[in-house]
Amino acid sequence: MVSKNKIVTDGDPLAFVLAPPPNETEEQRQIRLAAEAEAKRISDAIDEELQRQAKAEKRGPKPVKILLLGQSESGKSTTLKNFQLMNTPKAFRAERASWRSVVHLNVVRSIRAILEAIADAQMHQASLNNNSPIRTHPPELVHSPSMSSLGSRYRHPPLTAEHLKLKLRLSPLIQVEEALIRKLTPEGSGEFEATQLRANGSHADRARALDKEVAVNSQFAWKGMLSRVLNRNSLDSLEPTDPDDPARILQACADDMITLWRDPTIRKMLRAQGIRLEDMPGFFLDSLERVTHPKYVPTDDDILRARLKTLGVSEHRFTIKEGYSGAVARDLRIFDVGGHRSLVLAEDETVNRLEDSVLLWKSICSNPLLGKTNLILFLNKIDIFRAKLEAGILFGQYIISYGGRPNDYDSTSSYMRRKFGQIHKEYSPQARKFYCHFTSVTETKSTSEVLVNIQEMIIMSNLQSIALTG
Ligand SMILES: Nc1nc2c(ncn2[C@@H]2O[C@H](COP(=O)(O)OP(=O)(O)OP(=O)(O)O)[C@@H](O)[C@H]2O)c(=O)[nH]1
Ligand SMILES: [Mg+2]
């Protein structure tokens, strides 16, 4: 006997999958048909909405698309945050609470880097004290500048029992890190990624501490999720009640973290190991008291300084007012691309970042897919560049073609603008204008001036699509 529901699928796998179950009762059949009708209704409604949107887009001016391209850590997401702060400040500020966990994660990461550096120095001290085979000199000589055989890595005052006690007391922070990562990246939404060793940071422990980073998939609404959890209470009552809450443990460790970071021996030890936490993204150790306070809510500045690596591509929509009268609205679509994974932007950690930027700029300028696109170059982190010049670092030592020309900001920045401009001219498939800005996108005031200019320029020159590179 053949069941009334039996369908001949002729080997078609799709028809087979969609076929009703062979022993379906009448009641089950009714439920299935109702579900199918509902699914069709939703699908038709989506199609209708898409068609409506497509028609509306055809009628109105085309949205302006901005694609943010650049190396990982170059400041793309921070640039996007500036666009949000400028165009949708309420929405930007509504997400404040969500950034608290990111700031906490950044703090824990910095402390972990110090703890790993202590472990490294401790191992070295122990090997000297134990008279192990690697001991080649009496311990009292270790800090002598003449100890070239050991390099300068351990040339600092010895760590004391107090330092080791501090290290022990701060060890619960490792669990806090894990808890925060779980909070930010529930299964499938992100990843904890070990990137390659940096060229100048060859020590394995240090690389482990500094190069492992949490990345959040841009498709995942982590901000919404965290806001919902936090907004159940109001922003004023963020105080955690659960003793295992990461924020609570962080608060309990605050005094020890402050003592550790202020300790002169620890500072010398970090210097000797070549670790400059204050220059790294997501540095909050100078604000420990404030950011570990139970009622801490990140400021605009904190949000811009917080570091969270992007995975994948995310799209953000804004409406900007056209012309000085502001009468007509124009849609802006900004695409933020995670810099680390993208094939176009494959990075080589052994290459100097400025050199890498030049290579990336060449490939973007010559890319035929972007041939008709206007490019705006952001030479970002100019604050760090200035600080390096002021610290006496010679530009010509890294950019050989610069030679012995003056090492001041004006001369070096003009040189860079000229070089990037030449590449733009030489590699573009067809002539286009060169737009270039020196930026520090963690500074909202100067950045908003640049972005206002760009938005005006987009509207005035009626550009169809734009790529921004940081
Ligand atoms: N000092 C300084 N820090 C900056 C500047 N721009 C960005 N940063 C910091 O650098 C870190 C990296 O910035 P992001 O915007 O996350 O970099 P990204 O290009 O989105 O990186 P990926 O998501 O990995 O591709 C963040 O902690 C920022 O606060 C700047 O101009 N100056
Ligand atoms: Mg990013």
Image (tube, rainbow, N blue to C red):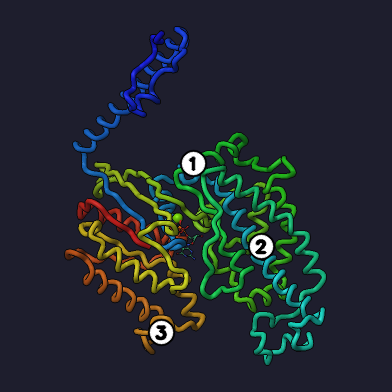
Q: Measured along the vertical axis of the image, is residue 217 above or below residue 468?
A: above
Q: Which residue is mark 2?
A: 111
The mark that comes first in sequence, 2 or 1, is 2
Helix, strand or loop at disc 1? loop
Q: Position of residue 329 (x, y in %)?
A: 27, 42
The residue sitting at 17% across, 64% down in the picture is: 430
The mark that comes first in sequence, 3 or 1, is 1
For the residue pair 329 and 269, the one nearer the viewer reads as: 269
Task: State which quadrant residue 241 falls in.
Answer: top right
Task: State which quadrant residue 12 falls in.
Answer: top left
Whole-Å distance between the Cαs marked 3 and 1?
Answer: 45 Å
What is the three-letter code of the residue carrying label 2?
Ile
| Residue 221 tag number | 1
For the residue pair 113 and 87, the one nearer the viewer reads as: 113
Contact check, label 2 and label 1, Cβ < 8 Å: no
Whole-Å distance between the Cαs marked 2 and 1?
Answer: 28 Å
- For the C terminus, the image quarter is bottom left
The mark that comes first in sequence, 2 or 3, is 2
What is the three-letter code of the residue carrying label 1?
Ala
- For the N terminus, the image quarter is top left
Helix, strand or loop at disc 2? helix
The residue sitting at 27% across, 61% down in the picture is: 375
What is the three-letter code of the residue carrying label 3?
Gly
The residue sitting at 37% across, 88% down in the picture is: 403
The residue sitting at 36% across, 76% down in the picture is: 413
